[in-house]
Image (spheres, rainbow, N blue to C red):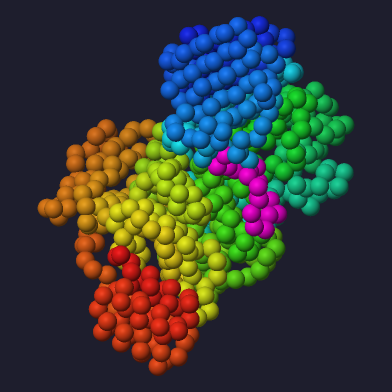
Amino acid sequence: MTVHEHFRIPTRPVADPANVIAGDHYRISVLDAGLVRLEYSPSGRFEDRASQTVLDRAFNGPVEHAVTDTGDQLVVGTDRFELTYDKGPFTTHGLSVRAKGGFHSHDSLWRFGMDTPNLGGTARTLDDIDGEIDLEGGVLAFNGIAMVDDSDTVLLDADGWIAPRTEGNLDLYVFAYGRDYKQGLKALYALTGPTPLLPRHALGNWWSRYHPYTDDEYVGLIDRFREEGVPFSVGVIDMDWHLVDIDPAYGSGWTGYTWNNELFPDPAGFLAALHERGLSVALNVHPAEGVHAHESAYAAIARRMGIDPDTETPVVFDPTDPDFLEAYFEELHHPLEAEGVDFWWLDWQQGGVTRIPGLDPLWLLNHFHYLDSGRDGRRPLTFSRYAGVGSHRYPVGFSGDTHITWESLEFQPRFTATASNVGYGWWSHDVGGHFKGYKDDELATRWVQLGTFSPILRLHSGLNPFNTREPWRYSSDSERVMKQFLRLRHRLLPYLATMNVRAHEGEPLVQPMYYDHPEQAEAYTVPNQFMFGPDLLVAPITSPRDEVTGLGRVRAWLPEGEWVDVFTGLRYTGGRTLLLHRDLDSIPVLVRAGTVLPLASETDAVAGTDLPEVVDVQVYAGADGAFTLVEDRDDDRWARTRLTWDDGAARLTVHDVEGDPETLPVGRRYDVTVFAKRPNAVEDQVFAILDRARTGLDLKATVLDVVRDDGAAARTVSTLQALDLPPTLLAALTEVLLAEG
């Protein structure tokens, strides 16, 4: 078989010879000042092909390094690491790498065969998980050194097809960047390939529900959302789009490629109706059971695989056979895409075994589906589970079927942020959870709020008539807040589209707090808090509200500086850890003074995901600031617009467009809202907390009098402590009173 051109990806797998130190059975390649490849081959044959993980070993050219060879020991050093090796088979005592940079020599030492703790990575799936799980390792470590073992992955030949490795060879990559986390991450992307640009529609709201919709029911639902002013940009159709109730002789019904015409009598018309409403459409596919005789495409694919269709012999799913894989795309997927399917939800749950040692079928499907989706020059997109280091090349990630519980919600912010430690930035969770669990309006609302500040916002629920995510199926307060946040997600599109480019350039959208503050111990104590792009600090509320105050709360750490909550307007002095309290209307999302935040206007946000005609620029006064808005229409015709805020002059300047100004809508307008620097309205905030609190009326009045009369905030807090208030109420009042220090 000749591999299609679009299945070949650019690679530079051979390291610069100037960086290589080799013996009969070992090879050491210094790929960067903090990255070294370690190979051992009993046969003396080393590997210069790309692997499923590694595409580029020549990304940095010659790297300055020193080599000392004493005959029985080799020492290789750069300004970031020192490697010591006895030239024999890799052993714990014979091979080590120490990260430089002021770390304790024992803690920063990696030895072959010993586990070295790192800051974690991610996991293949959260299927059937209720709470947290152990995570696979990443490439970043508090002690400065981490290792990725690439010994057992498959290789990529020059024509783009897969090949097994030489059995018994070791192929290791040691990352020794100390706590320069962002540089370590950029080295990972240079080695394994960049995060691709997402199509713009992927950044908006996704509707996904496991439910046997009819075409009229689905279109009617989208129309109802439009009438309610709730925008969606992606519609995901779960497995009932295809035949599922089939003769057991043809399989279980989980795998299918034939439309269920009872539900969808006119598939092309249905897909066109969704396109007319501004949605891109994904179909769910479980490919493991192959193609059986009941499928409309069976005869065509059977003939291509040398099977007489009259025998009704199943076409076995074998992705290691290039002839099958070619037919799989051309006979099963391309005809459906011609009808209007935009991309595929690869719902692989059938293990990791194939005929080729080391080949994970999930990785293979992700790889070739992603490449195939871009065959016509479109910006490619897949939706599937994580399949190991390098999976960031195949966004978007589907994290699996979680339980509908507070414990599941509690784990998701940390899970998302920590995934960046292995370069995986575009997770899509089941917002609201998938199944089991319970109905809880507050839980559902908090999940939507987190989803708004997640890489992908995809509402989803499992097969149960009582399990759904339409806001109007919840209480009036939850409905109102859910709608506000779903609209906000689309208002954030100018910011998100810029972050899409930033992710492509090596900065994941969601980052743990320790990326920018690696030497601050507090940054490691708030795993559920994260930066959403460089401007938004998010501390989601993931536990039920307090019964006394009626408020949710979260422990947060604010770095030094002045911070402003974008929802409440409260200003905080940073450099401390504190408890933040919020009613159901918001979660803590804070920006630094001087932040320039571009949003789509409310009218443009509800209309869809096109570039907005009006950009609402929110400026948080108190310091100078800037933002460069980066826009295109999925065609790489970029327009960059610099927005700068001069705090002293109280002036925002919209600079001339760089790049292609015709990309922008004709008559583009920028409306500016300045949130001036002024003292917090403490008394109003205190009154609102007291008014909601379930405690004595006389006590409330006493507290309010103290706040009005006592003057200095510290003295006021001291007085309140003597009133024997419920601890949670005192904490909420203290937050407001001491917000500014």
Left or right: residue 704 versus residue 184 is: left
Left or right: residue 518 versus residue 257 is: left
- Between 96 and 290, which is closer to the camera in this rendering? 96
Q: Position of residue 581 (x, y in %)?
A: 43, 69
Q: Quadrant of the N terminus?
A: top right
Q: Residue at x 48, y 81 (%)?
A: 726
Is residue 229 highlighted in magenta?
A: no
Q: Position of residue 374 (x, y in %)?
A: 52, 31
Residue 125: tell me if it is visible. Answer: yes
Give above or below for 546 relative to 401: below
Q: Residue at x 50, y 8 (%)?
A: 17
- Between 204 and 517, which is closer to the camera in this rendering? 517
- Between 628 and 544, which is closer to the camera in this rendering? 544
Q: Quadrant of the C terminus?
A: bottom left
Left or right: residue 554 versus residue 435 is: left
Q: Quadrant of residue 351?
A: top right
Q: Position of residue 147 (x, y in %)?
A: 59, 30
Q: Residue at x 58, y 42 (%)?
A: 120
Is residue 121 highlighted in magenta?
A: yes
- How would you classify the magenta stretch by its main secondary structure? loop
Residue 139: tell me if it is visible. Answer: no
Q: Quadrant of residue 729?
A: bottom left
Residue situated furthest left in the rendering = 649
Q: Position of residue 86 (x, y in %)?
A: 64, 15
Give above or below for 407 relative to 492: below
Q: Residue at x 40, y 93 (%)?
A: 698
Q: How many marks?
A: 0
Magenta stretch: give its range. Answer: 118-135
